[in-house]
Amino acid sequence: MALNKFMHPRNPYKEKAPNFKALSLKYPEFAKCVFQDLKGKCHLDYKSPTSLRQLAIALLKEDFDLDVEMPLNRLIPTIPLRLNYILWIEDILKELAQVKGRGIDIGTGASCVYPLLGCKKNDWSFLASEVDETNFTMAEKNVQRNNMENKIKVKKVSGETALLELLEDETGDYDFCMCNPPFFADHMEAQAITSSRTDDRAEPTSVNTASVGESITEGGEVEFIRKIIVESVKLQDRIKIFTSMVGKKTNLPCVKKDLQDHKIPNYQSTEFCQGKTMRWGIAWTFDTNLSFPRSLFQESKKNKKLSAPLTYTVPQSAVDVYDVEHVADKLMGILKSLEIEYTKSDDSKAKRIHLKLTAYKNTWSHQRRKRREMKRQKEELKAVCTGRKEIGTEEQDDDNGKNKNVQEINVDDPSNKQINLKRKEAPSSDEHSPKKQKVEESLIPSDSDQGALKRKGAPGTEEHSSKKMKVGESLIPDGINSKNPSDQSGLKRKGAPTTEEHADKRQKVKETIGNSDREKKLRESKMTENQDNTTTKSEEAWKPRTSDSPVATSDSPVKARTSDSPVKEGDTDVFLIKCDLFITETEKVHIEMVYAEGQKDQMNQILQYIKNHIALP
């Protein structure tokens, strides 16, 4: 019975289990199901439907003075587990300003256990629905046996809707609705053939007596609860709080996803523990001012997480002045470089500074990879800048060359002889003519070659002549036939690019540098904007909830995200982790990080990053 410690604190069976020996002495039918071991201790066969029925009947009579009958071929309720659900509803209703004590039970069953317990304990009134004819008849009889006709109304429905048909002829508003839906989608899942139950998991200790309609529904419990969610949008003005039990933990994320898809602003899950069995509850409301209670199981998990904060002693070499203030300044610089938002509060008397941290993206992992990327970008930018300088030098040389070609040079001047020696004289037009003639002759086929070409369907002499002219023209350098000396200056520099090529190359370099400059300015502007908004965003993330703000619960639709999921621009409500960082001073300065919400493993990574960088200059 490892889970009994997580039962509801007001559940009477948490501290005191049912006394089978005392019950057997008082209820003869129950005594027939009890057997004693050699030590005289009484035991019950939980695999027997008769034993389960007599136990439920005896507990209801002994602890709640309820007289109930149950058929063996219908679902037999486990009283401690059903009581956990009622106690959870009690806790939720405490958060309402006005409580009428009116509830709805969807699929009440033959025992009508939820309405009977609610009316007996809290004097509530119930509207209960039932699809099965046998369950409907037996539920009405149980209501009559306990004289609760004025408190409980059982209504036969078709089952096509969860709530709409039930409320057609009814008036007034209701505080809550509750439901224990069919768990399974088909017989294969009901027999654990297609379920996610692992082989090493122990088999159920009790027998299932539920009918097909009570245990199987199309789409399983997820589809059944989805139907309630859809109808709750239409009935949000008539029912304040919607709840349902969930039989399988793997279905809980699917139900929460449906709540998010239907824009439900406030919801919360809980755990129902009893013996070796755990069930889950889901509650939602359209009232953003309502706070749902947390179960003992959730509180124990939270306390376990918070029981061991991460600590680190700051070395004296980390700061020039070894005190809380200077360490805090060093830490805030690191946090700013990581784009982690924070708010600062200090206690000068206690020598303690408190930083509330909120991280929206992982900026502390893969630092070596990021440094290599930054180095590569710097090298590319340096190469582009170097290319621009080389182009500028070539342009200057080109302009100087043109000026020298235009001006008159005195060959007899001794100062110009060195220039004439360095320049390689370009061939004249007469020197080009023999080369041109040889090229043209090589392109003219002989008579025998022309005959062979004609036999193969090659182009005629006229076509070759046109081709010859084009090739000849292409082989004549620019400026050969020009009379302007400046046009022929390009020939004097072997392989030098033309002015147009310089212009194109210069334009491409300018565009590349311009793009890199714009990207750099854009990154700097975004970083500046993030730093300016740091305090505002962090204050909004940690400010107390007002009456107009939605409740921030652990299951709210806007919550912590996974490290792989990206944060969209402007989506500042989706955080990666929230934690508290305390800087205290005794003999030395200590850092203590306490988890709040989100991915706890990220807090370890942040602290490790701080350890690696706090001592750096």
Image: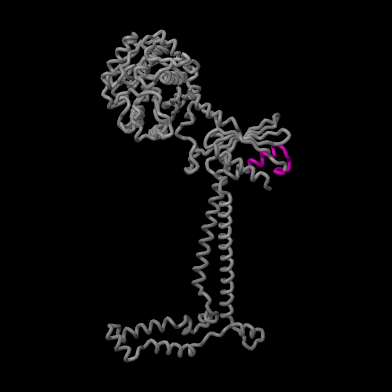
Residue 413: horizontal and vertical position, in percent?
65, 86
Q: Nearer the viewer, residue 468 or 521?
A: 468
What residue do we see at 49% from left, 84% from top? 483
Counting the numbered discs, the total is 0
What residue do we see at 64% from left, 88% from top? 412
Residue 512: horizontal and vertical position, in percent?
52, 61
Residue 3 in magenta stretch: no
Task: Give the side of residue 507 with respect to residue 326, left or right.
Answer: left
Q: Nearer the viewer, residue 420 or 351?
A: 351
Q: Main secondary structure of the magenta part?
A: helix
Residue 324 in magenta stretch: yes
Region of the chain picked out in magenta, as a range = 317-333
Residue 617: horizontal and vertical position, in percent?
68, 48
In this rendering, is residue 88 above or below 473?
Answer: above
Q: What is the basis of the colouring in this image?
A: one colour
Residue 338: horizontal and vertical position, in percent?
58, 44
- Specify whether residue 230 is in view: no
Q: Nearer the viewer, residue 162 or 481?
A: 162
